[in-house]
Amino acid sequence: MSMAFFRQFVAPALIVLVFLVALVATSARIFLPEGLSAPAPVEEFASPEKAALSSSLQPRTEGALAVSSAVTN
């Protein structure tokens, strides 16, 4: 009897309670001051390792142009 009571009343009540808490938490940003409700700023910090990595990941345009000109001829 106690397991049926848990399945029918306690578990659904806990699920609804968790949903309502999440709903209130996500809706609370409407009432925050303007500065806090804005998205966080994204800043790029170019470290030497990242700069070297990003330059090595750049596509080679001269190879692509050679292939595209060979295909069009």
Image (cartoon, rainbow, N blue to C red):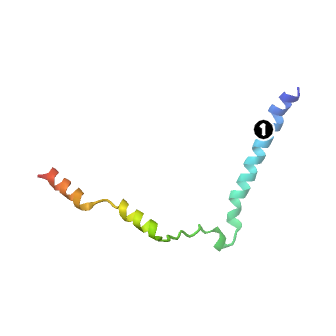
Give 46 or 20, whichever is nearer the viewer: 46
Q: Residue furthest left?
A: 73
- In the image shown, does 3 or 66 lie closer to the viewer? 66
To which quarter of the image does residue 40 belong?
Answer: bottom right
* Total number of numbered discs in the rendering: 1
Q: Label 1's element?
A: helix
Spot occupied by residue 5 in the image (x, y as percentages of width and height): 85, 31
Who's the residue at 64% across and 73% down the image?
35
Density class for disc 1 (Cα within 10 Å; few <14, some 14-19, many ≥20) is few
Which residue is at the far top? 1
Report the side of 24 relative to 72 (left or right).
right
Residue at the extreme right: 1
Q: Quadrant of the N terminus?
A: top right
Q: Residue 41: x, y in percent?
A: 56, 70
Q: Is residue 22 left or right of residue 1?
A: left
Q: Which residue is mark 1?
A: 12
Asked if residue 65 is positioned above or below residue 37 in the image, the reply reads: above
Amino acid type of the residue that numbered disc 1 sits on in the rendered structure: Pro
Query: Percent from the top left, x then y, of residue 38?
Result: 61, 69
Quadrant in which residue 7 is drawn: top right
- Image position of 49 with respect to 19: above or below: below
Residue at horizontal 88 percent and vertical 29 percent from the top = 2
Give the residue displayed 79% in from the left and 37% down from the top.
11
At horizontal 49% and vertical 70% (from top left) the residue drawn is 44
Q: Position of residue 37 (x, y in %)?
A: 64, 68
